[in-house]
Image (cartoon, rainbow, N blue to C red):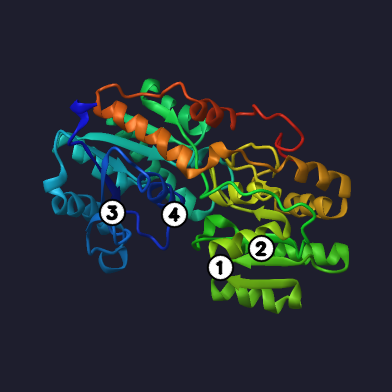
Amino acid sequence: MSKLRGWRVVVLMLNNFGGMSGGDKFAFEVFGRFRRLQVWWVGTMAARPSWRAVTIRLRPKGLGFLPYLLVSPFWALLSARRLLSGHTIAFSSGDFVNDVLAGFIAKRIFRCKWVAISHMSLISRNRWLSPWARVNRYSQFLSYALMRSADLVLVVDKVTKEDLKRLGVDEGKICVTRNGIDRVRRAIEGGIKRYDAVFVVSRWHPQKGVQYIPYIWRRLQSEMGVAPSLAIVGKVPGEVVKEFKAMRFGDRVSFLGFLSEDEKFKTISESKVLIMPSTYEAFPIVMLEALSVGTPVLAFDVGVARMDGVRLVRAGDVDAFADALRELLTDQKMYAKLAEAARLSDAYSWDSISSEVERLFLSVAAGRPGPVNSATQRAAEATRMGEHETIQGGSPA
């Protein structure tokens, strides 16, 4: 271990396109808990006051989208050049092209070790894509090509691992990890369900599918006589709010805005179903939050983890999504079976994940990159690819 003294991790966080992404959350929670490796934060995201950080004053709105993608990696590395050496592990916090390019340059020019991460399976596999996703897939191909040079690539699901292998990334460099939550909470037995459904959005993006909810609710109102009660947590664009109000759902739809962590968990636990009509996802943290308090999840089958307590419907079939939600709200036996399966183990705590990832980074520093045979690795891989072939987490409806 004495040979590893002096090693540091430089976390590159350049993907500042409106709020904290799942990748940003992963980086903050995992690297903020490291105990043996010194961590520096470099980028546009504001780190916590007690952390070592190099903040670059560069924003997409100031430069424009494409110039920002090209300039930000060089700007960040020049700002942090004193931290970059042969005893540095550069970590690209996202799979967007500027994060990945920064890690690639750190390895090629500054001779750092480089660890990359991909939080999402190759979105071009989905036949139903939003316009944003159709543009984003081209940058994702470039990111994956650059990742061939990485010393280690972390992924949050086995599907992404298979994508990377097909695009030429050495399988020995790919390690399946997972997202987590602050602490694994327990379901509240006999708790009152104030809402039929809850929708949580930490940052606005068309991929989250909030634009499809008004149609779903109008259909359900027509079929059920009254619209299901819905809690929307997070910031939603004004035009979406106006669309809901124009449909006269009244107090059946509640816009709660941003909530504290405790209030958010309370709202999720008081809801019968968490709905996720996203156009693409991989291993969303909000899904884990719902399962940890015993709330089942309904989502499109666009790469979302196949876990017990999660029901998937055909990607892009909004009518099938509405039908599945109506079944869960009206068929007590079906709902009870899905809700009973909605549980989460302690392996999904950030403390457990951080400890495992730090061991991986120490192996990279020691010149032994590659997956470790751990409970986290085995459980993460078992989460995907149909290993959970039950009615709770099985094939799409």
Q: Answer with mark 1 or mark 2, whichever residue precedes in sequence.
A: 1
**Can you say whether 237 is above or below 380 in the image?**
below
**Mark 3 or mark 4, which is nearer to you?**
4
Question: As shown in the figure, which amino acid type bears the numbered disc 4?
Answer: Ser
Q: Residues within 10 Å of mark 1 (few under 14, many from 20)?
A: few
What's the CA distance linking mark 3 and mark 4? 17 Å
Residue 69: which numbered mark, if any? 3
Residue 117 percent coordinates (x, y): 38, 39
- Give the Cα separation between the discs numbered 1 and 2: 9 Å
Residue behind mark 4: 21
Q: Judge depth for marks 3 and 1 and give the one in front.
A: 1
| Residue to which mark 1 is pinned | 259
The disc, 1 or 4, on the residue closer to the chain's N-terminal end is 4
Q: Residue at x 76, y 72 (%)?
A: 252
Q: Nearer the viewer, mark 1 or mark 4?
A: 1
Q: Quick check: marks 3 and 2 in contact, CB under 8 Å?
A: no
Q: Nearer the viewer, residue 308 or 366?
A: 366
Q: Please provide percent x and percent y for residue 132.
A: 47, 54
Distance of label 4 from label 2 (alpha carbons): 21 Å
* Rendered view: 217 above or below 98: below
Q: Earlier in the sequence, mark 4 or mark 2?
A: 4
Disc 2 marks which amino acid?
Thr
Mark yes or no: residue 248 visible.
no
Q: Quadrant of the N terminus?
A: top left
Residue 267: give its label: 2
Instruction: Give the label, 3 or 2, closer to the camera.
Output: 2
Instruction: Determine the CA span between mark 3 and mark 2.
Output: 37 Å
